[in-house]
Image (cartoon, rainbow, N blue to C red):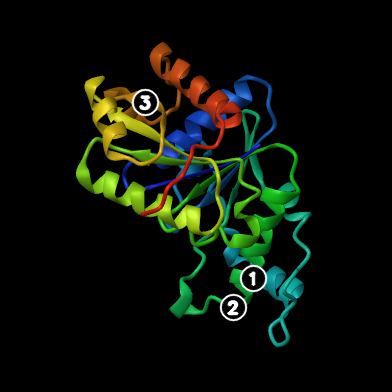
């Protein structure tokens, strides 16, 4: 099972990734969490005490695998997750580092290496892989998009968040992602979920109520039966829900 998580900055995608990882690990699943956000905070959110070096900083290894002149377009990466992942409470974590946009050297060895690694994680790993992406989905190219079992777009009950979600949805559809769902976050009133669904063109499969404890301290030690139940529901629906019927205007 491969789940990508995206959304506007501050919407709560890293928190959702951590909650999903903790819930899946508690169910005995093998979990590999991947921080692919340019501002990596998933390690701290999951309670890792050590600083985890982003893979993009392993310049000697990348040069060895990719080359610096004539680059290998398919470098060896299958050993990277097991060799460089940190582990805590049954969750393995790797931190990617930012993949640069088109004008910033998208053909550089680091980008080739990280994109090959993402392709390996999505298409060849056999555990639950949770990919915490930035809003742009830059790392998820066409070659790997169809291998993602679900894309979860985290939304808040505000116009900017919903506008960003629709943009992510359209981008994801363009690169071939089939199962795209919204997760409503920071919900203060159940009627907000209905309003969110009315304004989105793809389905909401879960709603996380606003929690001051979660806002201040993150998922560490969280004991909230409502949130825990909702996270289990999101995990299950991500796997079993049929792809929605998409229409692009």
- Measured as percent of width and height from the top left, residue 185 is found at 33, 32
Question: 223 or 247, which is in the foreground?
Answer: 247
- Mark 1 vs mark 3: give the one in front: 3
Q: Residues within 10 Å of mark 1 (few under 14, many from 20)?
A: many
Q: Is 114 located above or below residue 107 in the figure?
A: above
User: As drawn, is 168 to the left or to the right of 238?
Assistant: left
Q: Residue furthest top?
A: 225
- Measured as percent of width and height from the top left, residue 237 is found at 54, 26
How far apart in space, not on screen, are marks 1 and 3 (Cα)?
36 Å
**Residue to which mark 1 is pinned:** 112
How far apart in space, not on screen, are marks 3 and 2 (Cα)?
40 Å
N-term mark: 3 or 2: 2
- Mark 3 vs mark 2: give the one in front: 3
| Occupied quadrant, residue 230 | top left
Q: Residues within 10 Å of mark 3 (few under 14, many from 20)?
A: many
The reply to whether discs 1 and 2 touch (Cβ–Cβ < 8 Å) is yes
**Residue to which mark 3 is pinned:** 207
Q: Is 189 located above or below residue 138 in the figure?
A: above
Question: In the rendered image, is residue 227 in sight?
Answer: yes
């Amino acid at each position: 099972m491969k789940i990508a998580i995206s959304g506007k900055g501050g919407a709560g995608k890293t928190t959702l990734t951590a909650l999903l990882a903790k819930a899946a690990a508690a169910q005995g699943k093998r979990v590999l969490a991947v921080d692919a956000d340019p501002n990596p905070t998933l390690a701290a959110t999951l309670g890792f005490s050590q600083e985890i070096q982003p893979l993009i900083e392993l310049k000697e290894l990348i040069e060895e695998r990719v080359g610096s002149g004539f680059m290998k377009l398919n470098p060896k990466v299958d050993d990277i997750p097991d060799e460089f992942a940190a582990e805590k409470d049954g969750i393995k974590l790797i931190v990617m580092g930012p993949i640069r946009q088109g004008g910033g050297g998208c053909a550089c060895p680091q980008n080739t290496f990280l994109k090959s690694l993402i392709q390996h994680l999505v298409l060849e790993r056999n555990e639950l892989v949770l990919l915490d992406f930035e809003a742009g989905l830059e790392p998820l190219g066409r070659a790997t998009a169809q291998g993602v079992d679900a894309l979860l777009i985290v939304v808040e009950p505000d116009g900017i968040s919903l506008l960003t979600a629709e943009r992510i949805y359209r981008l994801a559809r363009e690169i071939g992602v089939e199962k795209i769902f919204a997760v409503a976050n920071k919900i203060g009133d159940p009627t907000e979920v209905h309003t969110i669904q009315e304004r989105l063109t793809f389905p909401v499969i879960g709603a996380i109520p606003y929690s001051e404890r979660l806002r201040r301290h993150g998922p560490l030690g969280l004991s909230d039966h409502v949130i825990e139940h909702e996270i289990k529901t999101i995990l299950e629906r991500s796997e079993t829900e049929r792809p929605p019927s998409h229409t692009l205007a």
